[in-house]
Amino acid sequence: GAEVFYAEDLGFFAKAGLNVQIQPGQNGSAIAAAVAANAVDIGYADIGALAKAHTRGIDFSIIAPAAMWDSKAPVNVLMVAKGSPIRSAKDLNGKTIAVPGLGTNAEFAVHAWLDANGADASSVKFIELSYAAMPAALEAGRIDAAHVAEPFISVAKEHARVLASADDALGKVYLRTVWFSTSSWAKTHPDLVARFASAMRQTARWANDSRNKGKSAAILVQH
Protein backbone atom coordinates (compact mmCIF):
# COMPACT_ATOMS: atom_id res chain seq x y z
CA GLY A 1 0.00 0.00 0.00
CA ALA A 2 2.98 2.30 0.47
CA GLU A 3 3.80 2.15 -3.24
CA VAL A 4 1.66 5.17 -4.07
CA PHE A 5 3.52 7.30 -1.52
CA TYR A 6 6.84 6.21 -3.01
CA ALA A 7 5.59 6.91 -6.54
CA GLU A 8 4.35 10.37 -5.57
CA ASP A 9 7.47 11.40 -3.66
CA LEU A 10 9.94 9.98 -6.18
CA GLY A 11 8.16 11.46 -9.19
CA PHE A 12 7.19 8.15 -10.82
CA PHE A 13 3.57 9.32 -11.19
CA ALA A 14 4.67 12.62 -12.72
CA LYS A 15 6.98 10.75 -15.08
CA ALA A 16 3.99 8.66 -16.20
CA GLY A 17 1.96 11.82 -16.77
CA LEU A 18 -0.38 11.16 -13.87
CA ASN A 19 -1.79 13.75 -11.46
CA VAL A 20 -2.69 11.67 -8.41
CA GLN A 21 -4.52 12.47 -5.18
CA ILE A 22 -3.88 9.88 -2.45
CA GLN A 23 -6.76 9.13 -0.09
CA PRO A 24 -5.99 6.67 2.76
CA GLY A 25 -8.58 3.98 3.51
CA GLN A 26 -9.29 1.91 6.63
CA ASN A 27 -9.07 -1.56 5.02
CA GLY A 28 -9.62 -3.47 1.80
CA SER A 29 -13.38 -3.81 2.22
CA ALA A 30 -13.83 -0.08 2.88
CA ILE A 31 -11.66 0.81 -0.12
CA ALA A 32 -13.58 -1.62 -2.34
CA ALA A 33 -16.81 0.10 -1.31
CA ALA A 34 -15.31 3.50 -2.18
CA VAL A 35 -14.21 2.29 -5.63
CA ALA A 36 -17.60 0.69 -6.28
CA ALA A 37 -19.30 4.00 -5.40
CA ASN A 38 -16.95 5.90 -7.76
CA ALA A 39 -15.65 7.94 -4.82
CA VAL A 40 -12.12 7.00 -5.97
CA ASP A 41 -10.89 5.69 -9.31
CA ILE A 42 -8.27 3.17 -8.19
CA GLY A 43 -8.04 1.27 -4.92
CA TYR A 44 -5.73 -1.05 -3.01
CA ALA A 45 -7.16 -4.20 -1.44
CA ASP A 46 -6.41 -7.81 -0.65
CA ILE A 47 -7.67 -10.60 -2.85
CA GLY A 48 -10.12 -11.70 -0.14
CA ALA A 49 -11.97 -8.37 -0.13
CA LEU A 50 -12.27 -8.43 -3.93
CA ALA A 51 -13.45 -12.04 -3.91
CA LYS A 52 -16.14 -11.09 -1.38
CA ALA A 53 -17.23 -8.20 -3.63
CA HIS A 54 -17.30 -10.51 -6.66
CA THR A 55 -19.70 -12.90 -4.92
CA ARG A 56 -22.02 -9.91 -4.47
CA GLY A 57 -21.99 -9.10 -8.16
CA ILE A 58 -19.62 -6.12 -7.99
CA ASP A 59 -17.49 -6.01 -11.14
CA PHE A 60 -13.86 -5.09 -10.39
CA SER A 61 -10.75 -5.41 -12.54
CA ILE A 62 -7.24 -5.90 -11.20
CA ILE A 63 -4.98 -3.41 -12.96
CA ALA A 64 -1.63 -3.99 -11.20
CA PRO A 65 -0.14 -6.39 -8.65
CA ALA A 66 0.85 -5.06 -5.23
CA ALA A 67 2.14 -7.22 -2.36
CA MET A 68 3.27 -10.83 -2.50
CA TRP A 69 3.03 -13.02 0.59
CA ASP A 70 6.27 -14.91 1.19
CA SER A 71 6.46 -17.20 4.21
CA LYS A 72 10.22 -16.54 4.39
CA ALA A 73 9.56 -12.87 5.16
CA PRO A 74 6.24 -12.61 7.06
CA VAL A 75 4.85 -9.11 7.51
CA ASN A 76 1.60 -10.24 9.18
CA VAL A 77 1.45 -12.50 12.24
CA LEU A 78 -1.09 -13.71 14.77
CA MET A 79 -0.18 -12.35 18.22
CA VAL A 80 -1.33 -12.86 21.81
CA ALA A 81 -0.41 -11.04 25.02
CA LYS A 82 2.90 -12.12 26.59
CA GLY A 83 1.15 -13.48 29.67
CA SER A 84 -1.61 -15.21 27.73
CA PRO A 85 -2.12 -18.94 28.39
CA ILE A 86 -2.89 -19.43 24.68
CA ARG A 87 -0.24 -21.67 23.11
CA SER A 88 -2.06 -23.42 20.27
CA ALA A 89 -4.90 -23.02 17.80
CA LYS A 90 -7.21 -25.10 20.00
CA ASP A 91 -6.67 -22.65 22.86
CA LEU A 92 -8.45 -20.01 20.75
CA ASN A 93 -11.76 -21.89 20.66
CA GLY A 94 -14.49 -19.53 21.85
CA LYS A 95 -12.08 -16.58 21.96
CA THR A 96 -12.10 -13.14 20.30
CA ILE A 97 -9.64 -12.34 17.53
CA ALA A 98 -9.11 -8.91 15.99
CA VAL A 99 -8.47 -8.48 12.26
CA PRO A 100 -8.09 -5.22 10.30
CA GLY A 101 -11.19 -5.94 8.22
CA LEU A 102 -13.95 -8.55 8.22
CA GLY A 103 -14.16 -10.54 5.01
CA THR A 104 -10.53 -9.86 4.13
CA ASN A 105 -7.43 -12.04 3.73
CA ALA A 106 -6.60 -11.49 7.39
CA GLU A 107 -9.82 -13.15 8.58
CA PHE A 108 -9.61 -15.89 5.94
CA ALA A 109 -5.98 -16.65 6.85
CA VAL A 110 -6.67 -16.94 10.58
CA HIS A 111 -9.80 -19.03 9.89
CA ALA A 112 -7.78 -21.38 7.66
CA TRP A 113 -4.97 -21.64 10.22
CA LEU A 114 -7.43 -22.49 13.02
CA ASP A 115 -9.09 -25.20 10.91
CA ALA A 116 -5.74 -26.62 9.80
CA ASN A 117 -4.50 -26.92 13.38
CA GLY A 118 -7.41 -28.66 15.06
CA ALA A 119 -9.39 -25.69 16.32
CA ASP A 120 -13.08 -24.96 15.74
CA ALA A 121 -12.97 -21.72 13.76
CA SER A 122 -16.76 -21.42 13.90
CA SER A 123 -16.54 -20.89 17.66
CA VAL A 124 -14.23 -17.88 17.31
CA LYS A 125 -15.53 -14.31 17.30
CA PHE A 126 -13.81 -12.05 14.77
CA ILE A 127 -13.95 -8.31 15.31
CA GLU A 128 -12.67 -5.44 13.17
CA LEU A 129 -9.94 -3.29 14.71
CA SER A 130 -7.33 -0.99 13.21
CA TYR A 131 -3.72 -2.19 13.32
CA ALA A 132 -2.81 0.85 15.42
CA ALA A 133 -5.33 -0.13 18.11
CA MET A 134 -4.36 -3.82 18.31
CA PRO A 135 -1.28 -3.60 20.61
CA ALA A 136 -3.18 -1.70 23.32
CA ALA A 137 -6.20 -4.03 23.02
CA LEU A 138 -3.97 -7.08 23.50
CA GLU A 139 -2.23 -5.51 26.49
CA ALA A 140 -5.56 -4.58 28.12
CA GLY A 141 -7.05 -8.04 27.50
CA ARG A 142 -9.96 -6.71 25.43
CA ILE A 143 -9.12 -9.28 22.76
CA ASP A 144 -7.46 -12.69 22.98
CA ALA A 145 -5.44 -12.49 19.75
CA ALA A 146 -4.83 -10.15 16.84
CA HIS A 147 -3.67 -10.45 13.25
CA VAL A 148 -1.04 -7.70 13.31
CA ALA A 149 1.01 -6.17 10.48
CA GLU A 150 4.23 -4.19 10.45
CA PRO A 151 5.14 -1.63 11.61
CA PHE A 152 2.77 -2.46 14.48
CA ILE A 153 4.28 -5.90 15.13
CA SER A 154 7.42 -4.18 16.42
CA VAL A 155 5.28 -1.96 18.67
CA ALA A 156 3.19 -4.88 19.96
CA LYS A 157 6.22 -7.04 20.87
CA GLU A 158 6.70 -4.97 24.03
CA HIS A 159 3.58 -6.57 25.51
CA ALA A 160 2.74 -9.39 23.09
CA ARG A 161 4.30 -12.43 21.42
CA VAL A 162 3.88 -14.14 18.08
CA LEU A 163 1.63 -17.20 18.14
CA ALA A 164 1.73 -18.11 14.45
CA SER A 165 2.25 -16.99 10.89
CA ALA A 166 -1.39 -17.63 10.04
CA ASP A 167 -1.12 -16.50 6.42
CA ASP A 168 0.96 -19.58 5.65
CA ALA A 169 -2.29 -21.55 5.88
CA LEU A 170 -3.31 -19.97 2.56
CA GLY A 171 0.01 -20.70 0.85
CA LYS A 172 3.74 -20.19 1.12
CA VAL A 173 3.95 -17.67 -1.74
CA TYR A 174 0.98 -15.92 -3.32
CA LEU A 175 -0.31 -12.57 -4.54
CA ARG A 176 -1.89 -11.01 -1.46
CA THR A 177 -2.92 -7.50 -2.51
CA VAL A 178 -3.58 -5.66 -5.77
CA TRP A 179 -4.48 -2.30 -7.31
CA PHE A 180 -7.93 -2.36 -8.90
CA SER A 181 -10.76 -0.32 -10.37
CA THR A 182 -14.28 -0.97 -11.56
CA SER A 183 -14.26 -2.84 -14.87
CA SER A 184 -16.21 -0.01 -16.52
CA TRP A 185 -13.60 2.58 -15.45
CA ALA A 186 -10.76 0.37 -16.68
CA LYS A 187 -12.44 -0.11 -20.06
CA THR A 188 -13.04 3.62 -20.57
CA HIS A 189 -9.56 4.66 -19.34
CA PRO A 190 -7.14 2.14 -20.88
CA ASP A 191 -4.34 4.71 -21.22
CA LEU A 192 -4.57 5.71 -17.54
CA VAL A 193 -4.61 2.05 -16.51
CA ALA A 194 -1.48 1.34 -18.55
CA ARG A 195 0.35 4.38 -17.18
CA PHE A 196 -0.62 3.58 -13.59
CA ALA A 197 0.52 -0.04 -13.98
CA SER A 198 3.81 1.19 -15.46
CA ALA A 199 4.36 3.56 -12.52
CA MET A 200 3.62 0.77 -10.03
CA ARG A 201 6.06 -1.58 -11.79
CA GLN A 202 8.80 1.05 -11.62
CA THR A 203 7.97 1.78 -7.97
CA ALA A 204 8.01 -1.91 -6.99
CA ARG A 205 11.43 -2.39 -8.57
CA TRP A 206 12.73 0.59 -6.62
CA ALA A 207 11.15 -0.49 -3.32
CA ASN A 208 12.37 -4.08 -3.61
CA ASP A 209 15.97 -2.95 -4.13
CA SER A 210 17.69 -3.44 -0.75
CA ARG A 211 19.78 -0.34 -1.39
CA ASN A 212 16.62 1.77 -1.06
CA LYS A 213 15.43 0.35 2.27
CA GLY A 214 16.43 3.44 4.24
CA LYS A 215 14.90 5.77 1.68
CA SER A 216 11.58 3.92 1.64
CA ALA A 217 11.47 3.93 5.45
CA ALA A 218 11.98 7.70 5.47
CA ILE A 219 9.02 8.15 3.08
CA LEU A 220 6.82 5.96 5.29
CA VAL A 221 7.76 7.96 8.39
CA GLN A 222 6.90 11.18 6.56
CA HIS A 223 3.42 9.94 5.69
Image: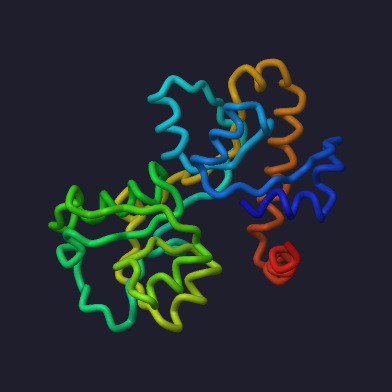
Figure quadrant of the C terminus: bottom right
Work out whether residue 103 or residue 137 is closer to the camera in this orientation and state it: 137
x and y, in percent, of residue 68 in the image: 50, 50
Q: Residue at x 73, y 37 (%)?
A: 198
In this picture the colour scheme is rainbow
Picture layout, residue 32 above or below residue 213? above
Q: Quadrant of residue 188?
A: top right
Q: Residue at x 33, y 82 (%)?
A: 82
- In the rendered structure, the answer to whether residue 78 lies left or right of residue 179 reads left
Q: Residue at x 60, y 38 (%)?
A: 179
x and y, in percent, of residue 78 in the image: 35, 64
x and y, in percent, of residue 218 in the image: 74, 69
- In the rendered structure, the answer to whether residue 96 lies left or right of residue 152 reads left
| Number of numbered discs on residues | 0
Q: Residue at x 54, y 35 (%)?
A: 32
- In the rendered structure, the answer to whether residue 189 lies left or right of residue 93 reads right
x and y, in percent, of residue 59 in the image: 51, 21
- In the rendered structure, the answer to whether residue 203 lies left or right of residue 84 reads right
Picture layout, residue 34 above or below residue 220? above
Picture layout, residue 135 above or below residue 125? below
